[in-house]
Image: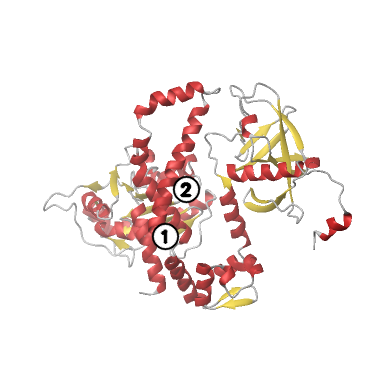
């Protein structure tokens, strides 16, 4: 087995274990009875006008044969991969059902032999609020022979939705911003490499999903999420209803009883983390062997890895990744060139992106963000933008009764003087910044608690999405993100250290010698 095949096999196993559900929407689905396999007709060689040809018009059985779907065979085949498959008629609640599935399979012509309803399902699925940035595999499985034409229509729709579809000459595998649409023909249509029988379709789709999630980090994510899916019932058992009286007692003792919900979410998250830690430790999806397989696969294409001016062969590159920079043939200051060397291209944006993921927590639309320690906002004055990070402790940012002062520190261009740095996402770009840790730079802004609340809650902007806060003078501040609590606390501690420096009269000679 080649290195590339070995790496793909590892990822396929992780993807297959992760996948749990598939939903098929098809108005020609049937459950074949013994000795009855649904409508039959001669297989017709496809052509651009195949469906409008006299052959089809004279043979009404053609549409039934080429468009029929043996639901029983498909469900059974999915089950062999451990995937629960449901087949839904488009007249039923298809839109709500497909949102819950890992794999969505759609017929092309779902109503009145037209694709309009399928395109509507695609639009709703890919652009709905619940599906922003969601990694999805969508499949068009059709008896129509013109897959290239169908793919062109789907590509045009994705472009109209600004989902940035990638170029693909065949138009049968269309990657877009957060997922992929693949097209397959039902077995009664002869198309080389794209005609697939119902019993073979699940295997092809597992391969397609695996190709979307192939990598070291996706492997860790798949393993972690699989642990959550398989261990969810353990968490439900731990937080059982018999603990409700104790929860109510805890809630009643809090000065703000509503805080009890958020507190329990934190504890549930810790339980989930325990499941993930255990599973990743057992499966080790990014183990030394996996890293070696990854590098061998990349090495098959580029041969040597260039880290700045220094080039390493494949074996030395494996040692670098598995034993560390200190044990490698590179100097310690080569850390800036590592991502570029592993990727074979300029990878500065990748380093920034990962740094951002590791330090900022994801805040979804609900609940809206709260203004407190670690919140990053943007102040706009006279056409200039100043980015600020909130330093007000969380305990001082809740249970507010009226106008309250919040303190902020500015984020500036990276400077050696200010070694505490953050990567902040501004729009679609990632920016490395320094936190200006000095009391003279403190910014004091006043806010009132949001209506019906005792804290300052972000309001969703109508223009371009995102959230904003409005101070007591009516000035608006765009919310850019929220640091994870441990990162925010570390910055607060460093700032406190700058405030607590004792002023002493010391020997100037000795002070200067300290720098040598």
- Residue under label 1: 285
Q: Is residue 439 left or right of residue 424?
A: right
- Residue found at x 45% / y 51%: 135
Q: Nearer the viewer, residue 213 or 61?
A: 213
Q: Nearer the viewer, residue 372 or 189?
A: 372
Report if residue 317 is visible in the image. yes
Mark before the other along the chain sequence, 2 or 1: 2
- Residue found at x 28% / y 47%: 84
Q: Position of residue 285 (x, y in %)?
A: 42, 60
- Label 1's element? loop
Q: Position of residue 394 (x, y in %)?
A: 62, 33
- Label 2's element? loop
Specify the farthest residue to the left: 35
Report if residue 184 is visible in the image. no
Q: CA distance from mark 2 to mark 1?
A: 22 Å
- Residue under label 2: 134
Q: Quadrant of the N terminus?
A: bottom left
Q: Is residue 338 left or right of residue 15?
A: right
Badge 2 local density, few (<14 within 10 Å), some, or many (20+)? few
From the viewer's perspective, is residue 244 above or below residue 156? above
Identify the mark at residue 345; answer none if there is no mark: none
């Amino acid at each position: 087995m080649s290195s590339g095949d070995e790496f793909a096999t590892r990822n396929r196993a992780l993807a297959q274990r992760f996948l749990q559900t598939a939903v098929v929407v098809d108005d020609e689905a049937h459950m074949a009875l013994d000795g009855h396999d649904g409508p039959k007709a001669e297989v017709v060689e496809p052509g651009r006008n195949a469906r409008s040809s006299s052959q089809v018009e004279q043979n009404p059985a053609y549409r039934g044969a080429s468009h029929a779907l043996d639901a029983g065979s498909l469900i059974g085949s999915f089950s062999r991969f451990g995937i629960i498959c449901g087949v839904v008629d488009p007249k039923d609640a298809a839109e709500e059902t497909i949102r819950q599935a890992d794999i969505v399979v759609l017929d092309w012509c779902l109503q009145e032999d037209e694709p309009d309803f399928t395109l509507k399902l695609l639009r709703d699925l890919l652009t709905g609020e619940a599906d922003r940035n969601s990694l999805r595999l969508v499949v068009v499985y059709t008896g129509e022979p013109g897959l290239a034409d169908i793919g062109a229509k789907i590509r045009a729709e994705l472009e109209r939705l600004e989902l940035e579809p990638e170029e693909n000459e065949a138009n049968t595998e269309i990657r877009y911003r957060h997922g992929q649409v693949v097209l397959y023909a039902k077995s009664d249509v002869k198309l080389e490499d794209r005609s697939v029988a119902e019993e073979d379709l699940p295997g092809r789709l597992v391969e397609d999903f695996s190709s979307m999630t192939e990598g070291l980090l996706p492997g860790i994510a798949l393993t972690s999420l699989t642990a959550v899916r398989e261990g969810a019932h353990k968490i439900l058992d731990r937080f059982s209803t018999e603990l409700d009286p104790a929860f109510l007692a805890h809630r009643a003792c809090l000065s703000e009883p509503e805080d009890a919900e958020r507190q329990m979410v934190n504890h549930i998250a810790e339980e989930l983390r325990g499941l993930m830690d255990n599973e990743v430790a057992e499966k080790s999806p990014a183990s030394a062997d996996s890293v070696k397989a990854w590098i061998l696969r990349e090495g098959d294409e580029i041969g040597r890895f260039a880290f700045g001016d220094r080039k390493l062969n494949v074996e030395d590159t494996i040692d670098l990744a598995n034993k560390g920079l200190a044990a490698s043939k590179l100097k310690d200051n080569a850390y800036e060139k590592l991502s570029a060397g592993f990727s074979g291209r300029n990878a500065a944006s990748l380093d920034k992106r990962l740094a951002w993921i590791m330090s900022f927590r994801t805040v979804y639309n609900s609940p809206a963000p709260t203004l407190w320690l670690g919140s990053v906002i943007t102040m706009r004055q006279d056409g200039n933008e100043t980015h600020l990070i909130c330093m007000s402790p969380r305990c001082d940012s809740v249970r507010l009764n009226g106008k309250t002062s919040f303190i902020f520190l500015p984020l500036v261009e990276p400077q050696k003087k200010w070694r505490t740095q953050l990567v902040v996402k501004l729009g679609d770009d990632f920016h490395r910044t320094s936190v200006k840790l000095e009391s003279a730079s403190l910014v004091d802004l006043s806010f009132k608690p949001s209506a019906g609340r005792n804290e300052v809650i972000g309001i969703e902007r109508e223009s371009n999405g995102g959230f904003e806060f409005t101070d007591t003078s009516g000035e608006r501040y765009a919310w850019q993100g929220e640091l994870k609590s441990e990162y925010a606390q570390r910055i607060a501690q460093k700032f406190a250290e700058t405030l607590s420096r004792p002023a002493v009269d010391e020997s100037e000679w000795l002070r200067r010698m300290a720098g040598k």
